[in-house]
Amino acid sequence: MRDRIFIWVEIPVSDMGRAKAFYERILATEMQSMRMGDEEYAFFPVKEEQNGGILVKGPRHTPSPDGVTVYIDGSPNLDIILSRVSEAGGQVIMEKTYLGDHAGYVGMFLDSEGNRIGLQHL
């Protein structure tokens, strides 16, 4: 069995400045940016280099609320993160919900770009 199945997440954006500001605000963090060719990137801070993600703006990346749902670690408190979503330009579409001991708490929002993003706290 593999140690991990998912090692990288790319969240498409149409406005990098707006999206970066949105995630920095709701997650109370700073993201490093870089440009490579015709794509722009902003990196989520991670402890483990091979298990992370980015915001990406480019011709092959289109935001959508209908695709795969990515769940971000909502520790230590989903309520705090969800409370920042609206004022940062997003929309909460699922308030903090308890799914049991195995899954813990989840919540969901549309980000500033229209992507459906989940939060989870075990």
Image (cartoon, helix red, strand yellow):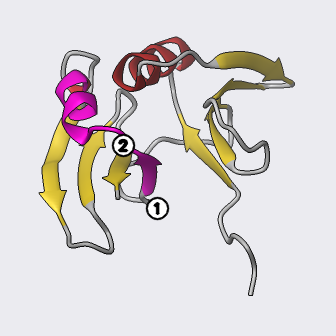
Query: What residue appears at the point 47 percent right and 41 percent down from the top-left corner?
Result: 63
- The location of residue 58, given as percent across then percent down, is 68, 32
Q: Is mark 2 on a helix, strand or loop?
A: loop
Residue found farthest to the right: 37
Q: Is mark 1 on a helix, strand or loop?
A: loop
Residue 44 sits above or below residue 32 on the image: below
Q: Can residue 80 be found in the magenta stretch?
A: yes
- The location of residue 114, given as percent across then percent down, is 35, 37
Amino acid under label 1?
Val
Quarter containing the C terminus: bottom left
Query: What residue appears at the point 69 percent right and 38 percent down from the top-left corner?
Result: 47
Residue 69 sits above or below residue 9 on the image: below
Q: Do the residues labelled 2 and 1 touch (CB within 8 Å)?
A: no
Quarter containing the N terminus: bottom right
- The location of residue 23, given as percent across then percent down, is 44, 24
Answer left or right for 64 relative to 43. Answer: left
Amino acid under label 2?
Gly
- Segment tinted magenta in the rendering: 70-84
Residue wearing tag 2? 74
Foreground pick, 59 / 122: 122
Q: Can residue 74 be found in the magenta stretch?
A: yes
Quadrant in the picture for residue 43:
top right
Answer left or right for 64 relative to 16. Answer: left
Residue 78 sits above or below residue 1 on the image: above
Answer left or right for 71 relative to 34. Answer: left
- Dot 2 or dot 1: first in sequence order is 1
The residues bearing labels 2 and 1 have C-alpha atoms spaced at a distance of 18 Å
Number of the front mark, 2 or 1: 2
Residue wearing tag 1? 68
**Crowding at mark 1 (Cα within 10 Å: few <14, some 14-19, many 20+):** few
